[in-house]
């Protein structure tokens, strides 16, 4: 009898896959290696079982690095959680983000008179090389001495990136792009990825002489309804001191994938990643006094600037993303600060790196993964049961930016567009520092009156001011992602030297006042038919205007031979009497009063 002790399996045989679990579950599937241990540990702690067959559709959670159409076709909405929104490329590829921001800015400039965050304020100048006219304009206007960085649209980790520093490199790139365009016209030809060129930020802020950028996180925890969160990440530094003339990409690109190629990486690994607290303390010590920065600039002004840019980018794709109950996504956002302390968005990445190869990452990444899954799962379960989403029991370090239940942005921004303190700002007289800001006066449209002879009452159309909301509704007027002292309200209109008595408000208007306090609604007037858009929760899309609001008692004098005015009690009111003025804050409005209204 032969003994099998000490026998080994032949090395050429493939490893046996783990046995697929059976039973009621719940099950989870993880595909890939980025964050596998963290996600698996989270699910196993909940008592879930891991499955290894990608074709199984009885999972509770599926987390994949790469997207495939088969995964989304088998997805059961309302029963399963699936990581990565299918068409997140509109936000997480270079060309997708560029197109979304351009289109959003163009549309908002046409339909919105409020201030909109401009791309030039936070996004480096970028050119698409797959658009012939745009590329030719770049090649023809390039000047020696300029530095541009060329990137493929869909790759990450610094792959395929190189610098453009002189005319010879521009000529070589131009011939390469022309050959690619010609090959793309051939049938069944699949060329390389499209590319963009982006103006290189020539004056980056340095930490101890090294270039750095900041990784933060944008979490779309739910798409039905939308819930969007922000979270701090960490600071990434290069191994070598910054040298703009160097051709070594490890001195220009800060991600860990590139820094591992540097021979000094193993020695300096712990110094290539800083926590946000250390970064904040360094800025306080080294730059606060010399640059005129407030204390804790990183944790206050810089943080708000990142949130402002993130919500602006989200709003640019909010109507494009595919929304199904159970989709969620974690996006890595990379920011750079120049030596004027202006904040630049470099790019957004799907499936951000979740490796923990140094002490700072061991502290940050696990909490990011755990809270991401906690929030996605809690919101998913509450929405299925019809429960109130807030308060969220699992919310800790993620900050809510957008609440889809009320279509509200939860962060207000009361500071300048640019975060750079170096720019010259208008001085304010000292006597105005403690007092309220005086708003510019604006002509108001006159309102018609109708006289009731029997009761000696002059009826005027008045608009009661609704209470200010704790947060601003995302309406076509203020869905720009930038709210510097911007408030929607309705203003009471009075004629000169006329004030209504306090006891002359009808019972109906009192009831309406109570209703306004319960549900604040932003109303937007349009010219033409007397209908107006109503945006608000539990409110119909279109709603006819109500009748008169305020009754003002006064004496009416009828001269001899004059016909008594027609009573308004049994007649239909003139449509112009019910015209309602809804305006933005005077400091932000450019509305013009129609001439025909002034004649009235």
Image (tube, grey):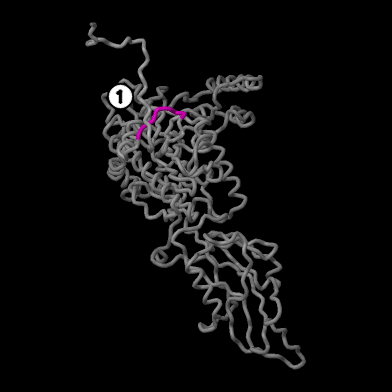
Judge by depth and name the residue closer to the eye, 480 or 356: 356
Q: Is residue 527 left or right of residue 519?
A: right
Magenta residue check for 306: no
The N terminus lies in quadrant:
top left
The C terminus lies in quadrant:
bottom right
Total number of numbered discs in the rendering: 1
When the figure is inspected, residue 528 is found, relative to residue 248, above or below; the finding is below
Query: Which residue is found at the position 42% from the left and 22% from the top?
Result: 247
Residue 456's x, y, as percent?
64, 88
When the figure is inspected, residue 358 is found, relative to residue 526, above or below; the finding is above
Residue beneath disc 1: 265
- The span picked out in magenta is 49-55
At mark 1, the secondary structure is helix
Residue extending farthest to the bottom is 560
Residue 218's x, y, as percent?
42, 42
- Using the rendered view, name the quadrant where residue 173 is placed: top right
- Using the rendered view, name the quadrant where residue 322 is placed: top right
Judge by depth and name the residue closer to the eye, 334 or 140: 334
Magenta residue check for 51: yes
Residue 325's x, y, as percent?
48, 45
When the figure is inspected, residue 369 is found, relative to residue 467, above or below; the finding is above
Q: Residue 334: in sight, yes or no? A: no
- Using the rendered view, name the quadrant where residue 490 is placed: bottom right
Residue 518's x, y, as percent?
47, 67
């Amino acid at each position: 009898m032969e003994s099998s002790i000490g026998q080994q399996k032949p090395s050429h045989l493939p490893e046996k896959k783990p046995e697929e679990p059976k039973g009621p579950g719940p099950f989870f599937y993880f595909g890939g290696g980025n964050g596998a241990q963290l996600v698996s540990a989270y699910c196993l702690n909940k008592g879930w079982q891991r499955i290894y067959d990608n074709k199984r559709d009885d999972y509770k959670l599926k987390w994949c690095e790469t997207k495939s159409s088969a995964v989304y076709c088998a997805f059961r909405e309302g029963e399963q959680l699936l990581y990565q929104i299918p068409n997140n490329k509109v936000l997480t590829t270079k060309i997708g983000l560029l197109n979304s921001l351009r289109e959003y800015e163009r549309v908002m400039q046409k339909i919105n008179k409020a201030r909109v965050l401009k791309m030039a304020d936070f996004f480096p100048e970028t050119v698409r090389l797959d658009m012939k006219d745009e590329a030719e304009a770049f090649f023809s206007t390039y000047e020696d001495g300029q530095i541009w960085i060329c990137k493929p649209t869909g790759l990450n980790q610094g792959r395929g990136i190189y610098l453009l520093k002189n005319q010879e490199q521009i000529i070589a790139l131009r011939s390469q792009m022309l050959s690619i365009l010609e090959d793309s016209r051939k049938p069944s030809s699949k060329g390389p990825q499209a590319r963009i060129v982006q103006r290189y930020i020539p004056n980056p802020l340095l930490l101890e002489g090294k270039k750095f950028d900041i990784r933060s996180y944008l979490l779309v925890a739910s798409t039905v309804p939308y819930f969007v969160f922000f979270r701090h990440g960490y600071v990434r530094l290069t191994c070598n001191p910054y040298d703009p003339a160097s051709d070594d990409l490890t001195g220009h690109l800060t991600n860990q994938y590139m820094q591992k190629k540097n021979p000094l990486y193993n020695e300096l690994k712990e110094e290539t990643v800083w926590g946000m607290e250390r970064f904040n303390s360094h800025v306080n010590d080294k730059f606060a006094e010399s640059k005129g920065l407030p204390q804790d600039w990183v944790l206050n002004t810089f943080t708000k600037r990142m949130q402002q840019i993130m919500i602006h980018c989200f709003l640019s794709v909010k109507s494009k993303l595919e929304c199904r109950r159970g989709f969620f996504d974690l996006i890595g956002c990379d920011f750079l600060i120049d030596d004027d302390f202006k904040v630049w968005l470099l790019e957004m990445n799907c499936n951000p790196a979740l490796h923990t190869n140094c002490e700072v990452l061991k502290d940050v990444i696990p909490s990011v993964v755990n809270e991401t899954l906690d929030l996605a799962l809690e919101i998913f379960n509450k929405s299925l049961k019809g429960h109130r989403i807030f308060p969220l029991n699992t919310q800790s370090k993620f900050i809510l930016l957008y609440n889809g239940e009320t279509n509200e942005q939860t962060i207000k921004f009361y500071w300048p567009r640019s975060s750079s303190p170096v720019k010259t700002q208008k001085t304010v007289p000292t006597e105005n520092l403690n007092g309220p800001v005086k708003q510019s006066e604006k002509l108001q449209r006159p309102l018609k009156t109708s006289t009731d002879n029997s009761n000696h009452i002059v009826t005027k159309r008045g608009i009661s001011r609704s209470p200010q909301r704790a947060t601003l509704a995302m309406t076509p007027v203020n869905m720009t992602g930038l709210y510097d002292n911007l408030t929607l309200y309705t203003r009471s209109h009075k004629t000169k030297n006329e004030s209504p008595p306090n006891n002359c408000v009808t019972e109906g208007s009192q009831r309406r006042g109570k209703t306004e306090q319960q549900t604040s609604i932003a109303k937007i007037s349009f010219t033409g038919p007397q209908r107006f858009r109503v945006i608000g929760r539990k409110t119909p899309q279109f709603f006819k205007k109500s009748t008169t609001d305020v009754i003002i008692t006064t004496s009416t004098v009828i001269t001899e031979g004059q016909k008594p005015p027609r009573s308004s009690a049994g007649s239909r009111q003139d449509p112009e009497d019910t015209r309602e003025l809804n305006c933005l804050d005077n400091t932000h409005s450019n509305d013009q009063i129609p001439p025909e209204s002034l004649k009235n």
